[in-house]
Image: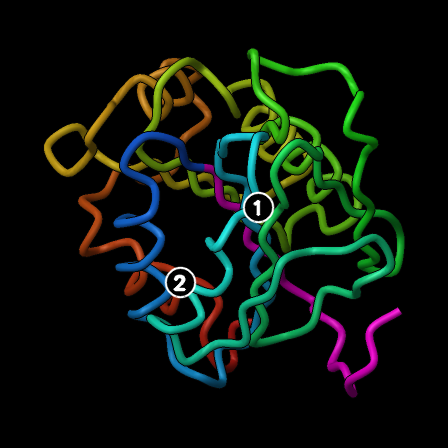
Amino acid sequence: MNETPCDPARCVIAMAASAGGLKALSVILGGLPADFPAAIAIVMHLSPCHESLLAEILSSRSLLEVRQAKTGDILCHSSVFVAPPNHHLSVVEGGILELSSSSAEKVHYARPSAEPLFASVAEVYQKKAIAVVLTGGDGDGSFGVSIIKDQGGMVIAQDRPSSQDFSMPHTSIKTGDVDFILPLSEIAPMLIELIGPGKE
């Protein structure tokens, strides 16, 4: 379990990225204040062949606390949890994170995939869930954004001009379930507007 005091998140943002994702995530997390009143869970397609430095890199670029997710971690306000390579990330009741085994079936040829994260966040947080689909290839996240919408949550997709690879956002946009299609520079301000102080 989490060893530090936790203000359990009442709002959760689930982000998914692939090609070009490090830049996109750096810009968004760097644009959020240290007291941002939500938790963020991130899935980025990573090589399963070596350890990831993604959490450390993002931590150096953000005022939020960024860590690589472990089973048993609790989604806390002002905290960011990054799925490790080769494990799906999901959320269960109480905002507790769970990692799949490294032999779990891939989704959209990816492990971690956005789908288990989006679907589980939708189930637990319902209208307090936001999905953000960022630059990347294939169609990961497209099923999950529909589940987010079905449960009353909101969906943001990165726009074509600011995406290194527009395939992933475009596939989600084609579902008709995306609320905002935004350039990278406008995503953090929108998140602040949607769930800033007083919006809970």
- In the image: residue 28, left or right of residue 10: left
Q: Which residue corresponds to the image point at 18% horizontal and 44% vertical from the top-left?
A: 183
Q: Which residue in the structure is indicated by mark 1?
A: 51
- Decide which of tag 1 and tag 2 comes sooner along the chain: 1
Q: Which residue in the structure is indicated by mark 2?
A: 57
In the rendered image, the quadrant that contains the N terminus is bottom right
Looking at the image, which is closer to me, 165 or 182? 165
In the current view of this chain or complex, which residue is farthest to the front?
50
Q: Which residue corresponds to the image point at 41% horizontal and 80% vertical from the top-left?
A: 63
Q: Which residue corresponds to the image point at 39% horizontal and 41% vertical from the top-left?
A: 156
In the rendered image, the quadrant that contains the C terminus is bottom right
Q: Which residue corresponds to the image point at 79% horizontal and 42% vertical from the top-left?
A: 99
Residue 25 vertical placement versus 60 (above, below):
above
- In the image: residue 47, left or right of residue 79: left
The mark lying in front, picked from 1 and 2, is 1
> What kind of residue is marked 1?
Glu
Q: How many marks?
A: 2
Q: Main secondary structure of the magenta part?
A: loop
Q: Is residue 7 magenta?
A: yes
Residue 31 location in percent, x, y?
A: 29, 70
> What kind of residue is marked 2?
Ile
Residue 34 location in percent, x, y?
A: 45, 84
Residue 46 vertical placement versus 3 (above, below):
above
Please report the bounds of the magenta region as a residue range.
Answer: 1-16
How far is mark 1 from mark 2, CA to CA? 13 Å
Q: Quadrant of residue 87?
A: top right
- In the image: residue 79, left or right of residue 158: right
State yes or no: discs 1 and 2 in contact (Cβ < 8 Å): no
- In the image: residue 73, left or right of residue 108: right
Residue 145 location in percent, x, y?
A: 54, 29
Helix, strand or loop under label 2: helix
Residue 77: assigned label: none
